[in-house]
Amino acid sequence: MPALVSTARLSRPLLLLAVVVSLVMAATLTLWAYYGTAVFFEIVRSGWLACF
């Protein structure tokens, strides 16, 4: 049986990216559920405009 090649060098950044994307999606869904769609989009739009 051949030895498995470790891809830890590549897996760690992908795992971190997956965790960050999951947290952003969870925060988005939580805010959407809490505030409703109209208020949620208004908050996101005003936050986006405040950045620029």
Image (spheres, rainbow, N blue to C red):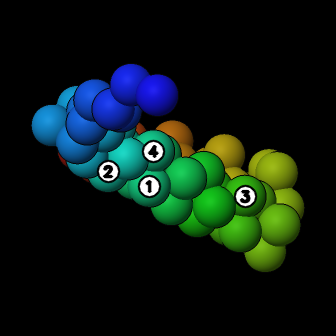
Between marks 4 and 2, how big is the CA–CA gap?
Answer: 5 Å
In the rendered image of this protein, does residue 7 appear above or below residue 39?
A: above
Position of residue 39 in the picture relative to residue 37 (left or right): left
Residue closer to the observer: 14 or 43: 14
**Is residue 49 visible to the viewer in this orientation of the structure?**
no
Q: Name the residue beneath numbered marker 3.
A: 29
Label 2 or label 3, whichever lies nearer to me, is 2
Q: In the image, which disc is placed on residue 16?
A: 2
x and y, in percent, of residue 29 in the image: 72, 58
x and y, in percent, of residue 25 in the image: 60, 51
Position of residue 26 in the picture relative to residue 21 (left or right): right
Sequence-wise, the earlier of marks 4 and 3 is 4
* Residue at 33% over, 32% down: 3
Between marks 4 and 3, how big is the CA–CA gap?
Answer: 16 Å
Instruction: Find numbered disc 1 in the image and state the secondary structure of the residue it sits on.
Output: helix
Residue closer to the observer: 11 or 44: 11
Between marks 1 and 2, how big is the CA–CA gap?
Answer: 5 Å
In the picture as drawn, the residue positioned furthest to the bottom comes out as 34
Kindly indicate whether the residue at mark 1 contacts the one at mark 4 (C-beta within 8 angstroms): yes
Sequence-wise, the earlier of marks 2 and 3 is 2
* Residue at 37% over, 47% down: 15
Kindly indicate whether the residue at mark 2 contacts the one at mark 1 (C-beta within 8 angstroms): yes
Q: Name the residue beneath numbered marker 1.
A: 19
Instruction: Find numbered disc 4 in the image and state the secondary structure of the residue it sits on.
Output: helix
**Is residue 51 visible to the viewer in this orientation of the structure?**
yes
